[in-house]
Image: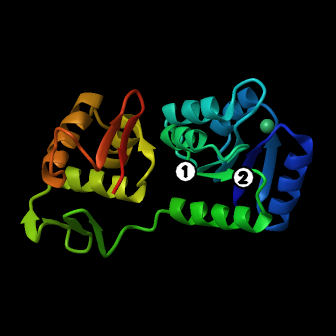
Amino acid sequence: MTRILVVEDEPGIALGLEDDLKMEGYMVETVGDGIAAARLARESSFDLILLDVMLPGKDGFEVCRELRRHGLDTPILMLTAKAEESEKVMGLELGADDYLTKPFGTRELRARIRALLRRAAGEPESGCYQFGEVAVDFDRGELRRRGQVLELTPLEFKLLALFIRARGRVLSRERLIEGAWGPNTFASDRIVDNHIANLRKKIEADPANPRYLRNLRGLGYRFDG
Ligand code: CA
């Protein structure tokens, strides 16, 4: 059964969300403050987190940042009160997967939840993914730039696949190590940075001013392709 954590301090909204999600067949737990939410999200395993921004204790941004710092990659859908662009961007940069501006309709909410759950199920990439002058052929394990085949090491290929799957989302170095090197490794942040530098040389027109593989200070890397 799919488990959803609802983090919302307004009882009316929390109850409405809970009822609606339960009717959809999800198992729901609700919590009303940021500190309890961060603890619960780390102790118990959820498939998705609905996270309000304005919360007592710790706000939704802080909760999101804390969870990502600890390597938790549960999809997070932020519920923002205002349609402020800065708020959305901040949430996404801190590692949220999507956002919804209040007030939102239940159909919109259900659609976003389903999309996030599908994405998190992580069907292996197949076919071809293109960005800029680069085409990644997952079936052949090949990368072409302006039609020319470029050699990628298996690790670089794994990293690129991780980035493409999580495009638009910040991935911490910890998360990249776990995804590309696996759990039993001595790989350090430095090694991640070196591999990313090499990857940039292959996919970026100007590796010193990367357009696709961006570094977000203190957070990790984000692929905008
Ligand atoms: Ca609130």
Percent of width and height locating residue 4:
72, 52
Q: Which mark is in front, 2 or 1?
A: 1
**Label 2: which secondary element:** strand
Query: Label 1, on which residue?
Result: 97
Query: What amino acid is at disc 1?
Result: Asp
Task: Tell me what residue is drawn at x 43 percent, y 43 percent.
Answer: 170
Query: Label 2, on which residue?
Result: 4
Among numbered discs 2 and 1, the one appearing first in the sequence: 2
Does the numbered disc 2 mark a residue whose Cβ is under 8 Å from ligand 1?
A: no
Name which quarter of the figure residue 151 lies in. bottom left
Query: What amino acid is at disc 2?
Result: Ile
Task: State whether residue 183 appears in this view.
Answer: no
Mark 1: few/some/many CA within 10 Å (<14, 14-19, 20+): many
- The answer to whether mark 2 and mark 1 are in CB contact below 8 A is no
Percent of width and height locating residue 34:
72, 30
Q: Nearer the viewer, residue 195 or 186?
A: 195
User: In the drawing, what numbered circle is on residue 6?
Assistant: none
Tell me the quadrant of the picture where the N terminus can be found: bottom right
Q: CA distance from mark 2 to mark 1?
A: 15 Å
Q: Is residue 59 left or right of residue 123?
A: right
Q: Residue furthest front?
A: 84
Percent of width and height locating residue 81:
73, 43
Mark 2: few/some/many CA within 10 Å (<14, 14-19, 20+): many
